[in-house]
Image (tube, helix red, strand yellow):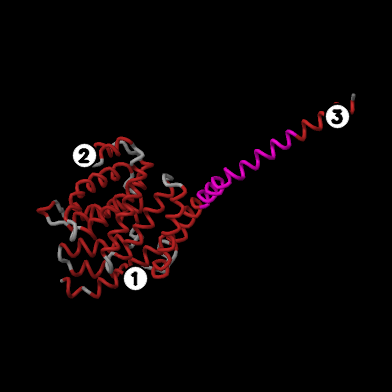
Amino acid sequence: MITKRRKGMRGIRVARRNVLLGTALMFLMTGCTSFKENMMVNTAKLMGKHGKSVVNRYPDPEQMRAAMPVMIIQSDMFLEMAPNDPELLLSASELNGGYAMFLQETDKKRSAAYYEKAKNYALRILTRNETFQEALGQSDEEYQEALLSFDKEDVPALFALLSATLGWISTSSADNPAALLDLPKVEAIMDRIMVLDDTYRYGGVHAVMATYHSARPVMFGGNLEKAKFHFEEAFRISERKYLMWLVFYAKYYAFSIQDRDLFVGTLQEVLDAPGNLLPEQNLANEIAKTKAAELLEQVDDQF
């Protein structure tokens, strides 16, 4: 009797073990792919978080330019697995926008395509906000109203959208004048970021606002007094260590007021800056130095 009971218990244990093995096998057959994808997505997020820091510290723009196409392909692959992940979308937007900037002077058509891709990635983050999604395609007033639904935590995506949209307009408006219709939306985004966090990216929104007012003729809304104020704010926030703002100051403001000495002096300040002035932005500062040298070579054509 005891032997039969033991045999019965052993049979139950075997059955349970078989169920567990079967369940595990089913998981391996049906869930392994999902598990691997989740693991890869989490790895991608870590790479994006720490990789961005490495990229920004990298002091060789040409080598980074050569590496960026591979990084973009890798980013697209990760987004195939997690198409709505906001961290991956933001990383992809910034990556495509950065590569577009490299191409802007030499290949406007490709640059515009990458800026548009960056813009669309940023929009995919921001349109999770239903109020904003509903405002797309509506009047500029409704668009501006919808921006009020964003908070400080949305500033990185808003700034990515701002940068990409301005780049896209700059590189595509010659062939597509309708792109200029997005300028009121650009102004609205700048105004919202200014309220939420004007210190983001070393006062980036001030530098963008200043460049915007410097580059536009007065009859089309440009304002040199506003431009000067916002450049000074960008310099205050960045402590004049983020050298690209100085390049913009010379290229747009000094040129607009036709002040050759200011133009030359500002660009020389960029070139004279030490190599490790802002270690976490070595790449941007080296790019700024390259652009400063190019602009100085053109000084006699500009003034």
Tag 2 secondary structure? loop
Residue 48 in magenta stretch? no
Q: What is the distance, in whole Å, between disc 1 and disc 2 at their CAs?
A: 48 Å
Q: Which residue is mark 3?
A: 6
Residue range of the region highlighted in magenta in the rendering = 15-43
Residue 183, position in %: x, y? 20, 50
Q: What is the distance, in whole Å, between disc 1 and disc 3 at their CAs?
A: 87 Å
Residue under the image location 27 percent in, 72 percent down: 294
Q: Is residue 79 above or below residue 196?
A: below
Q: Quadrant of residue 271?
A: bottom left
Q: Which residue is mark 1?
A: 272
User: Magenta region, mostly helix, strand or loop?
Assistant: helix
- Asked if the residue at tag 3 contacts the one at tag 1, i.e. Cβ–Cβ closer than 8 Å, the answer is no
Which image quadrant: the N terminus? top right
Mark 1 and mark 2 lie on one chain; the one further toward the N terminus is 2
Residue 134, position in %: x, y? 27, 37
The answer to which of 218 and 261 lies nearer the viewer is: 218
Residue under the image location 21 percent in, 66 percent down: 262
